[in-house]
Amino acid sequence: MATLHVRNVPEKLYKRIQKLAEDENRSVTAEVIQLLSQGLQAREARRGAAAVIERIRQRAQKVELPRGWMDSAALIREDRSR
């Protein structure tokens, strides 16, 4: 297992981590590992979601309606206004 040394941690931040560790019955080291893991998972999830949204946008730009067809959103708006 690798070792990570972090220097110059602000005192307020360290105290917050200590409090979290105490509340979860973990050591400060275990709590920092948990926080790093959660942070990385959240970041990866955001990147994954952004990639999916971008693929959807690209597909939407490629779709062309056949001549004479109306956009479904326009049809729905028209139906709701009745």
Image (spheres, rainbow, N blue to C red):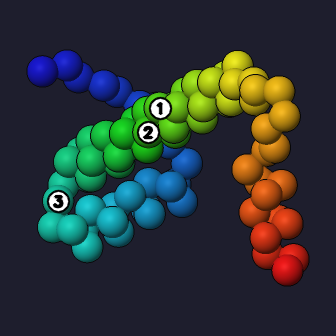
Q: Could you say which quadrant of the image residue 2 lies in?
A: top left
Q: Position of residue 29 (x, y in %)?
A: 24, 45
Q: Residues within 10 Å of mark 1 (few under 14, many from 20)?
A: few
Residue contact at pointers 1 and 2, CB within 8 angstroms: yes
**Mark 2 is on which residue type?**
Ala
Q: Nearer the viewer, residue 37 or 45?
A: 45
Q: How many marks?
A: 3
Residue under the point 85% across and 66% down: 78
Crowd band around label 2 with a 10 angstrom C-alpha radius: few (<14), some (14–19), many (20+): few
Residue 18 picture location, percent across and down: 34, 61
45 or 9: nearer the viewer: 45
Residue that mark 2 sits on: 45
- On the rendered image, what quadrant is the N terminus found in? top left
Q: Residues within 10 Å of mark 3 (few under 14, many from 20)?
A: some
- Identity of the residue drawn at 73% across and 50% down: 72
Closer to the chain start, of discs 3 and 1, is 3
